[in-house]
Amino acid sequence: MTPDSLLRRMFDKAVEVADPMQSLARVLPPKPEGRVVVVGAGKASARMAEAVEAEWGPCEGLVITRYGYARPCKGIEIVEAAHPVPDQAGADATLRMLALLEGLGEDDFVLALISGGASALLTAPAGDITLAEKQAVNAGLLASGTPIGQMNILRKHLSRVKGGQLAAAAYPARMLSLMISDVPGDDPALIGSGPTVGDASTPADARAILDRWNIEAAPSVHAVLAGETGVIAPGDPRLSKVENAIYAAPSQSLEAAAEIAAAAGYAVEILGDALEGEAREVAAEHAELARAAKGPQLLLSGGELTVTRRGDGIGGPNAEYALALAVALQGARGIHAIACDTDGVDGAAEVAGAIIGPDTLNKARAAGVDPSDALARNDAHSFFAAIHDQVVPGPTLTNVNDFRAILIEG
């Protein structure tokens, strides 16, 4: 097996073990008696709904997923909407979801299916904030390099559904919220901005994030953050009937990939499943580790890197990491790497990421593209398209965040 094919096999395995059709049934309880309503949002939510109906049969409910990520369900309605910047389809579906939860009683049961992407797909702006104003804040956050945890705090306080508010809308019904983690540290309050999890942050915290990351916002946004928002405190009685459970996480996918590498004769070092930081800076650090390593060895890592937009190119954190890694390695012999988002979408492009090797810069010269220029313009996707080293799996129907693997041959 070539290094590139081994890297791709590890990525595919990381995705496979997080597929709800492979993993959700083991944590799903028997279907409760009485009325059962299924709600959810995220890139994996339609696949999760499909897995639920495979066990429970047709169910009443509604979930919102990304365009292209719908799955066939017999009872649960699947709505597709925009990600990473919300759109009207997501806003309309969110209001219908809240209406579906109105009037539930103590004998009713709600199953919530939450995965990465729910922050954009569940859209119900607070106060007088318009959808366009919410979109502008989201776009500003995505271009600023703001860490995901900070993004989600701000998103919660600008919403009528995040930060425990979806669970509060279902009270006094019982709720089980099953989650796939795509956040560093697997904090359930951060997955999809925690629609079923209480949050102790304050409007002042949200205002500080706007200031810290220089996010421009409309007067309506500032007006909402000047008062009390709808975010539910952790001890609120309306959360007393909720059980939150993460059943798939980045660590499981990294461990599955590590088993493949070990079987192929590589010593494995997992650098962490919760890495954060600027993609190009982390890549430079990992290049030093790779140069110092003695093969055959594999360096694995997960988490969520960010990109501060400096240019006008097309890119994402994984492709930018791969490009920066190639530039830092300068064709070092025997070092190959892959960097992909397990949801199949890196940034806003329908590309998971890229593979690099000792010949990456030679390929670039032959194709007439400049890696340093592409990096300066945040144009990593265009760079890898030119040298035919993109990874394009299509919708993976799951999301346990970034997958990065560096192979050092002996």
Image: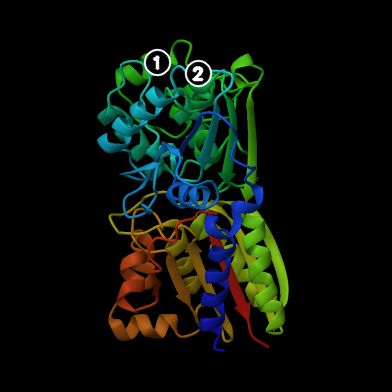
In this view, 32 is above or below 392: above
Earlier in the chain: of badge 2 and badge 1, it is 2
- Give the residue furthest to the top: 227
Task: Find residue 199 and report its horizontal and vertical position in percent.
Answer: 59, 25
Amino acid at dot 1: Val
What is the tally of numbered marks visible in this picture? 2
Distance of mark 2 from mark 1, alpha carbons? 8 Å
Going by the numbered disc 2, the residue's amino acid type is: Pro
The answer to whether residue 172 shows anywhere in this view is yes
* Residues at discs 2 and 1 in contact (Cβ within 8 Å): yes
Q: Which mark is residue 266?
A: none
Q: What residue is drawn where x is 59% and y is 52%?
A: 24
Q: Quadrant of residue 226?
A: top left
The residue wearing badge 1 is: 224
What kind of element bears circle 2?
Answer: helix
Visible residue check, residue 266: no
Residue receiving disc 2: 203
Q: Residue at x 56, y 81 (%)?
A: 6
**Circle 1 crowding by C-alpha within 10 Å: few under 14, some 14–19, many from 20:** many
Most distant residue in the front direction: 33
Residue 114, relative to residue 367: is it above or below? above
For the C terminus, the quadrant is bottom right
Q: Quadrant of the N terminus?
A: bottom right
Residue 388 position, x and y percent, is: 35, 79
- Residue at the spot 52% in from the left edge and 48% down from the top edge: 52
- Quadrant of the image occupied by residue 71: bottom left
